[in-house]
Image: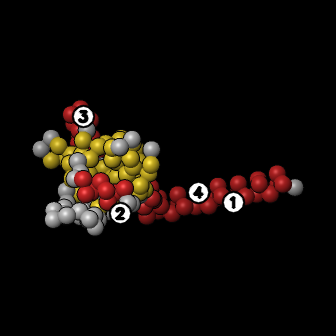
Amino acid sequence: MKIIARNNKAFHDYEVIDKVEVGIMLTGAEVKSIRAGRVNLLDSYAFCSRGEMYINHLHISSYERGGAYTPEPYRRRKLLLHRKQIEYYCAEVERKQLTLVPLSIYFKEQWVKIELGLCKGRKKHDKRQKIAEQESKKRISQIMNLKRKS
C-alpha cells in the first residue's frame, strides 16, 4: 500500500467515528497524475445523491502529457461502494448530522483507494483540549526517556 496524500487537517478539525475504504472512478490521465503525487485532499468531502456517493473538491492536477482531453481538476467524482454501505453512510450523515471526509488516498495494488472517515465536527474548545493533551503526553514521554537514560 503506497500512501499518496494524507489529510492531517481532518484529524484536527473532526473527530473520526468510523473509517471505510472506497474506490473512485478516474480517467487514465488522473491516475497518472495521482502517481506523480499531484493531488490535494484539503476541503474535499463526500456526499450522497440519488443513491450514489460522490466526492467533491478533490483537486487532481492535470497531467502534462494528457493529450487533448484533460478533465477539470475539481470535478465531481463517483465513489465505488457496495449498495448497503452507501445506504448506511448516507443514513448516518442525514440522521446524526455527520460529515464524510477523505482521510487519505493511496494505491492498493494497481487500484486507487480513498479512506473515508465518518466524522463529527470539533468545536474550538475541543481542538484546544486535544492540543493540550498531546503536549502533555509529549512532555511525559520526554521525562520518561530522560529517566531511562540516567
- Give the spatial CA distance, label 3 vs label 1: 45 Å
Amino acid type of the residue that numbered disc 2 sits on in the rendered structure:
Arg
Mark in the foreground, 3 or 4: 3
The x, y position of residue 55, in whole percent, is 24, 53
Residue with the mark numbered 3? 82
- Give the spatial CA distance, label 1 vs label 2: 36 Å
**Marking on residue 139:** 1
Amino acid type of the residue that numbered disc 4 sits on in the rendered structure:
Glu
- Give the spatial CA distance, label 4 vs label 2: 34 Å
Residue with the mark numbered 4? 133
Choose top left, top right, bottom left or bottom right for residue 132. bottom right
Q: Residue at x 27, y 57 (%)?
A: 30
Secondary structure under tag 2 reads loop
- Give the spatial CA distance, label 3 vs label 2: 28 Å
Q: Please identify the residue farthest to the right as the structure is shown.
A: 150
* Quadrant in which the N terminus appears: top left
Q: Residue at x 65, y 58 (%)?
A: 138
Q: Please identify the residue farthest to the left as the structure is shown.
A: 50
Amino acid type of the residue that numbered disc 1 sits on in the rendered structure:
Arg
The x, y position of residue 67, in whole percent, is 19, 64
Amino acid type of the residue that numbered disc 3 sits on in the rendered structure:
His
**Marking on residue 21:** none
**Marking on residue 38:** 2
